[in-house]
Structure formats: structure tokens, C-alpha cells
Image (cartoon, rainbow, N blue to C red):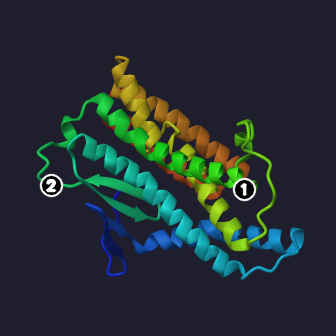
Amino acid sequence: MLLQEPARSPYDLEFRLGDFPVRIAWTFWLMAAVFGYGLAVGIDQIFLQEYRQWTPGVWLILLVWAVCILVSILVHELGHALAFRRYGIHSGIVLYHFGGLAIPLAGNGFGRSPARLSSKENLVIAAAGPVAQLLLAAAVIVLTRAAGYQVRLLPGWLYWIPGAGGGEPILNVGTFALVNCLVWPSVMWAVLNLVPVWPLDGGRIARELISLGGGTLRQALMLSLVAAGLMAVWGFSSGNVFLAILFASLAFGNWEMLQSMGGW
């Protein structure tokens, strides 16, 4: 399966965040570099050409991005992990090239299996990650705007929120990178995960909502297949090849699940 825990490697970084074991696969840093390089170049150009300010160079800005994306995705997975714990299930966090996973741990002593969770409990757990990430972005935006400064890379469709736009430019490149590299991926990653495609968070939410409404797994998978197909088409048409390949792969996985259920 595409979105599954990667194999362990001697190059992984492992530590504990409170009671939660965390593993960062080496491929996470590769993903951070690939997706952050263009953004780092853009920030460097904003300061050199528009603000006429010195910058430390693309690679140091990319380092700030890597730290920010680490914090953002870790907050996302911590949201899931805390929701698991609320329902008596201990979990660990893995960050890798497709983002992150909060994985229930067997033999944790909490006395409850994930298989015994209700639809409402699964719904809360699925929503907790994107909500935690959006709250992180909101906190950074509020603090930045309260200080009178601008979040330059705020997604355009968020400007309808009163007070989100405006403010003075941040002329310190480190602060600029820190603010914008926290906000942009936190919003976009959370929104991407809310697309109703299995096994993304949005697909899990859609599945539980359909179940609560008396629907079936087949209906949830059909919705997921259509949504994944539309996202793949949009990705190809907009030139976002990675996004297109990701959702095309998810669409294929959903199609295989539907075929395995028979009746086609």
C-alpha cells in the first residue's frame, strides 16, 4: 500500500515526545528538500529583488523550511495520537516521505483495540490531525497580525477572513521564513488531507460519516475513487505532477478495493 509505515533504517532518527515514540525516516528529509527548494528560492528572490535585503542564501532558508515542515507534520500526527489516547489507545508517530502516520501500538497495556472503536470515535481521530495543524497555522497568523506584520505566503483563498491580510512586510529573512514556512504547509497539508480520498484523513472522515448515515463501505470507496480521479486530473492539468501521481495511485488502490468486493 502506498501510505504505509516505511521499513526501518539505520539512518532514521528516533526519540520520544512525552509518552509518544517518534521515528523520522531519512526519506522525510528528502521530501522536505524536494518540496521546499522552490519555496526557498522564492523567499530568497523576494528579499533580494523586492525588499532589497540581504539573505543567507537558499540553503539556509531551506533548512528553516525543513524545521518548519517537521514541526507542522509532527503537530498533525500528534493530534491523531492524542485522539487515540483519549479513547484508550497508545500510538507512535512516524514521519516519512509521504508525510506522517500515527500508528496504534500493540501490547500497549491500555486494554483497547483500534478495531473496537465506534464510527464517532474514528471520526474524531481522523479529524484531530488536520484540526491540530490548522490551529497551529491560525496561532501563527494571529500572533503575526497582532504584531502588525504580514503573512506574505498566506493561501489566497484565506483572505476572506477578516484581518488575515494586510500588515507591514517582515524584513528579517529568518523571521519571514519561519512565519511563512509554518503557515503555508500547515494550511495546505491539512486541506490536502481533508480531500475525501481513502486512506487520507478526509477519506476516513467520509467513510465514518457515510457509515453514521446508514451508508456502506462501497459507497465510501466510490466517493473516494471519484475524488481521487478528479484530483489526479487537476494535478496533471495544473502541472503538479507529484500531486497527480499521488492521487492517481490512490485512485488505483481504491479501484482495486472495489473490485475485491465483487459485484462489478
Q: Residue at x 34, y 21 (%)?
A: 212
Expressed as whole percent of the image width and height from the top left, the position of residue 8 reads 30, 72
Along the line of sight, the residue nearer the viewer: 187 or 144: 144
Marks 1/2: CA–CA distance: 42 Å
Q: Is residue 246 visible?
A: yes
Is disc 1 surrounded by few (<14), some (14 to 19) or many (20+) residues within 10 Å?
some
Q: Look at the image and tell me whether residue 255 can be seen.
A: no
Residue type at numbered disc 2: Asn
Q: Quadrant of the C terminus?
A: top left
Q: Amino acid at mark 1?
A: Leu
14 or 164, which is in the foreground?
Answer: 164
Q: Eyeballing the image, is 176 above or below 112?
A: below
Q: Tell me if 160 is positioned left or right of 21 in this view.
A: right
- The quarter holding residue 218 reads top left
The circle drawn on residue 21 is: none
Residue at the front extreme, as displayed = 147
Q: Quadrant of residue 200?
A: top left
Which residue in the rendered view is the most extreme toward the top? 214
Q: Which residue is mark 2?
A: 108
Q: Residue 24 location in percent, x, y?
A: 39, 69
10 Å neighbourhood of mark 2: few (<14), some, or many (≥20)? few
Query: In the rendered image, which residue does mark 1 sit on?
Result: 153
- Residue 19 sits in quarter: bottom left
Between residues 112 and 47, which one lies in front from this camera angle?
47
Residue at 67% across / 50% down in the picture? 236
